[in-house]
Amino acid sequence: MSKLKDFSIPSARMMPVIILADISGSMSQYGKIEALNRAIAEMIGIFADEQDVRAEIHVAVITFGEDRARFYQPLQPAREIQWTDMEAKGVTPMEAAFELATQLLEDRNIIPGRSYHPNLVLISDGHPTNEKGKPSENWKEPLEKLLHSERASKALRFAMGIGPDADEETLKAFLTGQHPEIPVFRADETNIHKFFRWVTVTVTSRSRSVNPNSIIANAPDNLEDWEF
């Protein structure tokens, strides 16, 4: 009997999913912010239904717009999140979002040392700007610090550009050095959900695998070819 009392099932280890979402004023056009809200809510709902003894998916959303970046959704287990829709306004302070992501990833009080490698998702429809709305190069140093931080360097990273004005240079830089190589995905308001469904399938597959730290992300060559 004493041996039975000593036996315990290990608790699931955290698998973080951190979304960096552009909510600048341009996202209010053509239904982009509405489509993004629906896609994130659907993803969280699927994560919430995942039940695995190895991994528990936690989600955080860092928004950049409204002249600042902030933790719109603090890191929480997906099953505990009650999603409220984001609103689009302001400029595109992407560098501040990179700084917050680095801060979150390196905080051992929030993300314990035994957590699985994180998943990082960047979504934007334009160029990084300063507080006056002018194009800015200030994102480069914060991004370099993020990518060279201990945990982000091991993360599975995804990037999506929405519409023709999304800055390819920034999105590609976010994916620098990742293996296997994953391309920047281009979308409009009609297929944002396809990108998020692929992210969802990839993350849940990781969480169920024998080794959730292994990174397997077979990306389709064309977003239009995705079928779910």
Image (cartoon, rainbow, N blue to C red):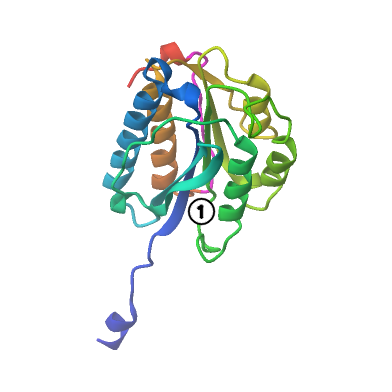
The x, y position of residue 90, in whole percent, is: 52, 31
Q: Which residue is found at the position 51% from the left and 53% from the top?
A: 116
Query: What residue span does the magenta drawing correspond to?
Result: 213-222
**Image quarter of residue 140:** top right
Q: Is 48 or 138 nearer to us in this picture?
A: 138
Q: Residue furthest bottom?
A: 2
Question: What residue lies at 57% left-to-right and 15% top-to-bottom?
Answer: 165
What secondary structure is found at the residue carrying circle 1? loop
Q: Amino acid at mark 1?
A: Tyr
Q: Is residue 107 above or below residue 40?
A: below
- Please name the residue shown 68% across and 43% down the image: 147
Which residue is the site of mark 1?
116
Q: Is residue 181 above or below residue 84?
A: above
Residue 129, how many percent across, how many down? 64, 29
Q: Quadrant of the C terminus?
A: top left
Vertical placement of 192 versus 202: above or below?
A: above
Does the magenta-highlighted stretch encompass residue 221?
Answer: yes
Q: Quadrant of residue 92?
A: top right
Number of numbered discs visible in the structure rendering? 1
Is 126 colored magenta in this rendering?
Answer: no
How packed is label 1: few (under 14 Cα within 10 Å), some, or many (20 or more)? many
Q: Spot the residue most to the front.
A: 132
User: Dominant secondary structure of the magenta stretch?
Assistant: loop
Along the viewing direction, whichever of 227 and 147 lies nearer the viewer: 147
Q: Quadrant of the N terminus?
A: bottom left
